[in-house]
Amino acid sequence: RPADDEPRQLLRRVRRALAELPTGWRLVAGIGRPRQGPGGLADTLTEARNAARLAAARDVRPSVEHTDELGVGRLLAAWQQSDITRAFAETALAPLGGPEHAHLLTTLRVFLEHGGSAAATARALGLHRNTVAARLRQVRERLGVPLDDPSNRLALQMACRALTSP
């Protein structure tokens, strides 16, 4: 069994290694718990895949997650992989589907990942805040959902994550 601080040290080392890669690479990593035997290896790989999915949902690079550090993130990973969540996501976000509306889906996803802040969304996307405001108006109109309601934001954020997770 690894020492208690070993997972955090490994997490820091992997983050440093990814930070040294070219910035254009959108590489993420997930780390599972060490286990023994073939069945243990399969469990470790499943945990690592789930951690990598959560890392990919973040806009910060390099993004690395360790299953021991996830907490509620494990629950979110299970939700966003479920068939029910994916079906909800496809239905709820259908008005933002298609290549002609991809910018609206991206804006919504980044807006939700930045806690509903239009200013932070504009910075993250490299856009003027008026452009973000206009896109968010279009999102509200197309979805028919108020984005200031916390329950709606949570549902839409889960839907966005479900659609963008591999």
Image: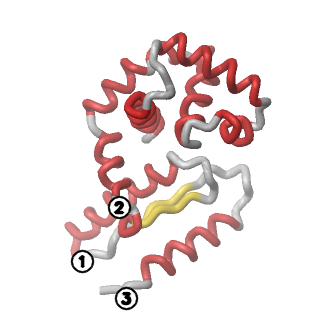
What is the secondary structure assignment of the residue under circle 3? loop
Quarter of the image with the N terminus in it: bottom left
Q: Is residue 115 left or right of residue 66?
A: right
Q: Residue 3: which numbered mark, if any?
A: 3
Q: Earlier in the sequence, mark 3 or mark 1?
A: 3
Q: Quadrant of residue 161?
A: top left
Which of the two marks, 2 or 1, is nearer to us in this view? 2
Q: Quadrant of residue 103?
A: top right
What is the secondary structure assignment of the residue under circle 2? loop
Residue type at mark 3? Ala
Which residue in the protein does label 1 denote?
36
Which of the two marks, 3 or 1, is nearer to us in this view? 3
**Residue 133 versus residue 118 in the image, above or below:** above
Which residue in the protein does label 2 denote?
71
Q: Whole-percent x and y of residue 123? A: 74, 41
Q: Whole-percent x and y of residue 122? A: 72, 35
Quarter of the image with the C terminus in it: top left
Residue at left offset 52%, top offset 11%? 142
Is there a contact, CB below 8 Å, between mark 3 and mark 2?
Answer: no
Residue at left offset 61%, top offset 16%? 137
Work out how far the residue at label 3 is from the one at label 2, CA to CA, in angstroms: 19 Å
- Kindly tell me whether residue 163 is visible in this rendering: no
Disc count in the image? 3
Q: Whole-percent x and y of residue 100? A: 62, 14
Crowdedness near tag 1: few (<14), some (14–19) or many (≥20) residues, C-alpha within 10 Å? few
Work out how far the residue at label 3 is from the one at label 1, CA to CA, in angstroms: 16 Å
Front residue of 109/153: it is 153
Q: Quadrant of residue 121?
A: top right
Front residue of 100/116: it is 116
Residue type at mark 2? Gly
Residue at left offset 41%, top offset 57%? 51
